[in-house]
Image: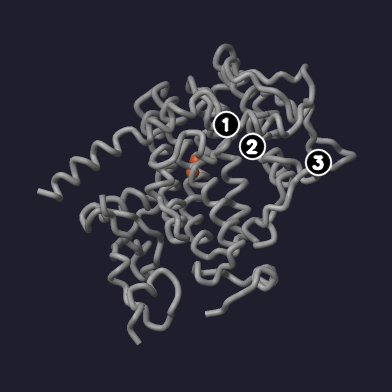
Amino acid sequence: MREFVYEVFARKDRGEPLTHIGYVDALDDETARVYAWKTYDEQNWFEMCVVRRSAIVPVNRTDGPFAANRRGTP
Amino acid sequence: MPQFTDEEIKAKVREGYVVESPEEMTDGYRKALVVQLTVQADTELMSAPAYWMAARHAPSANTQVSAHAIIQDELAHANIAYRLLEDLGESKEHLVYGRQPHEFKHPYGFDQPLENWAELVVANGFFDRAGITLLSDVYQNTSYGPLKRALVKVDMEETFHLRHGEVWMRRLAKAGGEARDMVQRAVDWMFPMTIEWFGLPDDLKRHSGQLEYRLKGLTNDELRQVWMQSTVPLCAQLGLEVPAHWDDEKQEFVLDYPFPCRYDAGVKHWLFQEGQITWDEVFERWKARGPMNEAYVESIQRSRGTVERWLDSRAAA
Ligand SMILES: [Fe+2]
Ligand SMILES: [Fe+2]
């Protein structure tokens, strides 16, 4: 069962910034949406979205969880 | 990115340095963090089947919902902690599905059967309070950034579990009669169980590195005191007896029974009259695990292989 890591972002209310609130492991985008919504239910979020970790392109860091996406590129 | 020696990283975190990625960690730091997170994840995970066992005794549809909401929270907390472990190179798959029941690192309290509604709410009042005590200390002091951020959600929800426990303890205690007796019986075995949960007293404690790497701030004895600061007055207010009291001279809570001592898990009874035992004997009891250990782990791992086979055969077709 191959799961992917998804980063979860949410915004509390209009005018608030979208912030990183956590992660879920899921088989695909659809299950990631459900898991994120069910897992991070501590607030009534105005907006929530998920991004597959492998889709995040690091800009300046060469370490940390996103670095692997750029490894090997100059 | 900086490469630290063990001494350097200890000095850095003492000054408030926040570690953000595994690449910055020394081997010692990583190992200490993995131990801490494994205990945390396993505790959250094993609280779910324990609470689930008790949830069937919920007295109404509403309380069914609140009990299951707590279980859902615990599973999410476990998932978050295992996710953090995965980022440190550990395998969640192995940790959850690949270990034998006795290999899990949760406290002995979550190897016990919770057999009625009073036991569930006292577990929320005592065990979840222990969870908050330990995790708020981690939240305030941890040098690992991702863990600190993850604990915001956990803390919010643990506060709800605790409130659920305390509100119901109060309701049952005030009702008197059999309801009060049930709560008192639960308190009788769960109070010493939680006291023991905080582990070795400071004068016997070996070096674990968790304080030096700033993965926590308070010692075992300090955490035990923090827990008693809330729990002992709460019980006094509810007219429930606990084997501990405030000592004016020492300016701390002291236990009224030999600690540590023997426990008869079959009848949920602490054998105070047999006197103090060694911590080695306690560790032996913990290692042998409690009565529900296998059943709880089995209920978590049960259907994994089957569903995985269905999905794999679909993928292969
Ligand atoms: Fe929890
Ligand atoms: Fe909890």
- The residue labelled by disc 2 is B197
Mark 2 residue CB less than 8 A from any atom of ligand 2: no
* Residue located farthest toward the top when viewing the structure as drawn: B177
Task: Please state which of residues B67 and B127 is positioned toward the viewer in this rendering.
Answer: B127
- The residue labelled by disc 1 is B109
Q: What is the three-letter code of the residue carrying label 2?
A: Trp
The residue mark sitting in front, 2 or 3, is 2
Q: Secondary structure at mark 1?
A: helix
Taking the spot 38% from the left edge, 72% from the top edge, the residue there is A66
Relative to B105, B272 lies left or right? right
Of the numbered discs 2 and 3, the one sitting upstream in the chain is 2
Taking the spot 24% from the left edge, 36% from the top edge, the residue there is B306
- The residue labelled by disc 3 is B252
Disc 2 residue crowd, few under 14, some 14–19, many 20+, Cα 10 Å? some
Disc 1 residue crowd, few under 14, some 14–19, many 20+, Cα 10 Å? many
Marks 2 and 3: CB-CB under 8 Å?
no
**Count of numbered labels shown in the rendering:** 3
Q: Quadrant of the C terminus of chain A?
A: bottom left
Relative to A73, B15 lies left or right? right
Residue B18 higher or lower than B84, as above or below = below
Taking the spot 13% from the left edge, 49% from the top edge, the residue there is B316
Residue B35 in picture, x, y percent from top left:
56, 51
Task: Please state which of residues B46 and B150 is positioned toward the viewer in this rendering.
Answer: B46
Q: CA distance from mark 2 to mark 1?
A: 7 Å
Taking the spot 56% from the left edge, 12% from the top edge, the residue there is B178
* Chain bearing mark 2: B
Q: Secondary structure at mark 3?
A: strand
Q: What is the three-letter code of the residue carrying label 3?
A: Glu
